[in-house]
Image (spheres, rainbow, N blue to C red):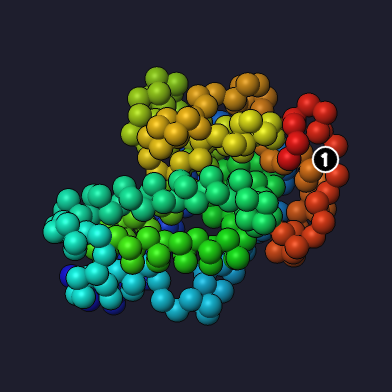
Amino acid sequence: MNHLILDYELPLRLIPFFAILVVMALWEGLSPRRPRAASRSTRWMNNLGMVALDSVILRLVMPATAISVASFVAPHGWGLFSVVGLSGWPAVVLGIMALDLAIYGQHVLFHAVPVLWRLHKVHHTDLDIDVTTGVRFHPAEVILSMGIKMGIVLVLGAPVVAVLLFEVILNGTSMFNHGNVRMGRKFDGWLRLFLVTPDMHRVHHSVIIRETNSNFGFNFPWWDRLFGTYRAQPANGHDRMVIGLSRYRDPKYLTFVRLLTLPFLPERKNPLSSHTGRQ
């Protein structure tokens, strides 16, 4: 099984990725939650170009992946799961949950530590939020994130299947919960008991700082509730909330090249600081 996953890792990741991307794009076209505030063609070129560049750079800089680390530690009996004798599907389920908790903690950290925020703010500068926002991450953040996941897999000794499923789920839910899609309020209320929904995560992309620093989860909503970072709805409602960062409202500063250099440039003056709080 492990050898099959390693041999077919790329298609096992890419097929669900493109399938969910297409489904979410069609859903957004048929039933959008919010009207667009910025040019979709420019944003999509930036966002999809970013994920393409991320993939190339990650392969060049880090030939090993979290899945290959899992395939190495499992036969050696390394990691916490081996120490406590956890194996089979319990190890898979707990491995997915532990990795998701780690990504939640990583997300909080990238908001709290200034040097990490410089990288992560590239994701938050998008002036709209849709399926492509879910893949808009600076290459340096993607490399750091992969390093963190590899470390967690090494410590846990998580099974290869758990790591593959987590990677596929993480990519899929990131595109789903960034989607500009409409769903019934009752259904959303029920679904967000088990999964981060678009209405739940959209709050995290609000220009209002106290909302930006909430709803950090990507897959499971439980961590936000458990650690007190959950916010049910945006103060101004989903139709009137402003997406993005108050310092970066001019599209001319959000070109593809600017996004790549943004973490290394001086912070722009915040024109909305009087009512959005310090960014």
Comparing 205 with 16, the one in front is 205
- Residue at 38%, 40% (x, y): give it: 220
Q: Residue furthest front?
A: 83
Image point (35%, 29%), residue name: 193
Residue 135 position in % (x across, y down): 54, 55
Is 168 rendered above or below residue 11?
A: above
Residue 41 visible? The answer is: no
Task: Name the quadrant of the N terminus.
Answer: bottom left
**Mark 1 — residue?**
270
- Does dot 1 land on a helix, a strand or a loop? loop
Q: Residues within 10 Å of mark 1 (few under 14, many from 20)?
A: some
Residue 22 % position (x, y): 46, 51
Tell me residue 269's x, y (percent). Answer: 86, 44
Name the amino acid type tagged 1.
Answer: Asn
Task: Please report the residue visible at 35 percent of the width from the left and 25 percent of the height from the top.
Answer: 190
Locate residue 81: give its quadrant: bottom left
Can residue 155 be seen here? The reply is: yes
In percent of width and height, residue 61 lies at: 53, 78
- Residue 190 lies, with reference to residue 257, above or below; the image says above
Residue lying at 20% horizontally and 55% vertically, measured from the top left: 91
Q: Quadrant of residue 8?
A: bottom left
In the image shown, does 135 or 271 lie closer to the viewer?
A: 271
Q: Is residue 10 above or below residue 29?
A: below
Q: Is residue 93 left or right of residue 259?
A: left
Identify the image quadrant of the C terminus: top right
Question: Taking 250 as reference, is 154 above or below it?
Answer: below
Judge by depth and name the residue closer to the eye, 139 or 174.
139
Total tally of numbered discs in the picture:
1
